[in-house]
Amino acid sequence: MQEGRRTTILFTGYAPVHFLCFRPLFERLSQMDAFEVFVSGGLRSKIESGYAYDEKGMYAPFDLPASQVLSVDAIRKRDFDFLFSACTKLIEPRRATTKVQIFHGISFRNRAIREANTKCDAYFFVGPYMKRKFVEAGLFEENDPRIMPVGFCKTDKLVNGELDRSATLKKYELDGSRPMLLFAPTGDKHNSLETMGEEVIAAIRDSGKYDLIIKPHDHAKNKIDWFEKLAPLADAHTKIVRELDVIPLLHAADLLITDASSVSNEYSLLDRPMIFLDVAKLIARMMERKESMLDMDTWGRHGGVVVKKAKKVVAAIEDCLANPTRQSEVRRAMATDLIYNPGCATDCAIEWITRRAAALASAPTGVGA
């Protein structure tokens, strides 16, 4: 690397959640004179030769400077010092000296733990549990130098005081007089929004006791227009939102309703009640997958209450809110095991990037650090 020039950093992904995991780093690095930061990839669609990527469709909602958003065709002709990705199948430039996997969450499905996800130069592991599962799978040695105990930058603002709950509620025209519930399902086929979601939403709405925000998954496997489908259920206390970043919603929620989504692990940082709508078919399909790393035993759904039928959800909500500390010990243990450096993972990541960039700058030309 040529001494004196700025370190070039590229992020690529194909879903908004991928960028959201990098956004805290994007914002910090973009303010540092030593770095040039770019993003690429885009919303992905299948074509005969592989995939097409719509970078404008993906990054426009984040209002990024146009000069920092590159097409996939453009990055194929360029070299970068760092490539960051939050997805297993990297969208790569012509060359990247250091490839870094930052992940886009971890659920009890453990989809990230597979052979295809072992080709990077560094891994910002989310927490001790993730490291343990990679080692148990024989994909990493315990002391593999690529393992960096960074944590999950996306969740920093859940616990670092950055968010204002009242502002979040006001954004959705809620006054805070009712408990706020967040329904955030996973995107896999047979998720809870597909199997019982409309009944659950109707039951909660008709109880007249709660504010409910529904956040459909932003890249679900089944392409269903939930905003149109659920519109008849919306009212002053029932909101179907297009918000891409679930973190402010988690921060504002008194209770989370989910199924097999990684948001339950993120929410454990707040030690608040959770309800898991049972998705038996989804879980069975995960269990049948080749090289499945599904883990229902370690943490799974132990931090909350499992509800199998929509007609029982309101009673479960009432019980959970009346006894909010009942599973607190489990949730605190979950959070400790699942997420390194809560609230300051971005600081840890920036420190590592800065050191690595300095090592690259001092290396002889053509030699990586």
Image: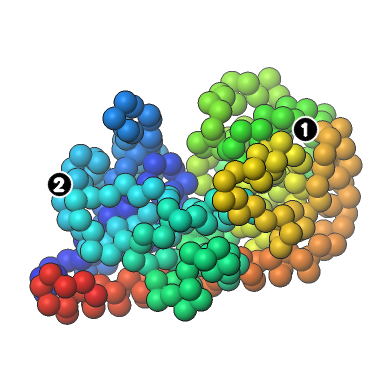
Element on which disc 2 rests? loop
| Residue 119 percent coordinates (x, y) | 36, 59
Tell me, yes or no, if residue 56 can be seen here.
yes
Q: Is the residue 12 above or below the residue 268 in the image?
A: above
The colour style of the image is: rainbow
Tell me, yes or no, if residue 39 can be seen here.
no
Q: Amino acid at mark 1?
A: Val
Q: Is the residue 4 above or below the residue 216 in the image?
A: below
Numbered marks: total: 2
| Residue 365 percent coordinates (x, y) | 10, 73
Dot 2 or dot 1, earlier in sequence: 2
Residue 3, picture quadrant:
bottom left
| Residue 185 percent coordinates (x, y) | 64, 40
* Quadrant the C terminus occupies: bottom left
| Residue under numbered circle 1 | 200
Q: Amino acid at mark 2?
A: Lys
Element on which disc 1 rests? helix
The residue under the point 75% across, 46% down is: 276
Marks 2 and 1, Cα distance to the nearest angstrom? 50 Å
| Residue 255 percent coordinates (x, y) | 74, 50
Circle 2 packing at 10 Å, graded few (<14), some (14-19), many (20+), is few
Nearer to the camera, 300 or 135: 135
The residue under the point 49% across, 55% down is: 114
Residue 262 left/right relative to 112: right
The residue under the point 71% across, 24% down is: 233
* Quadrant the N terminus occupies: bottom left
Residue 149 left/right relative to 46: right
**Residue 77 circle label:** 2
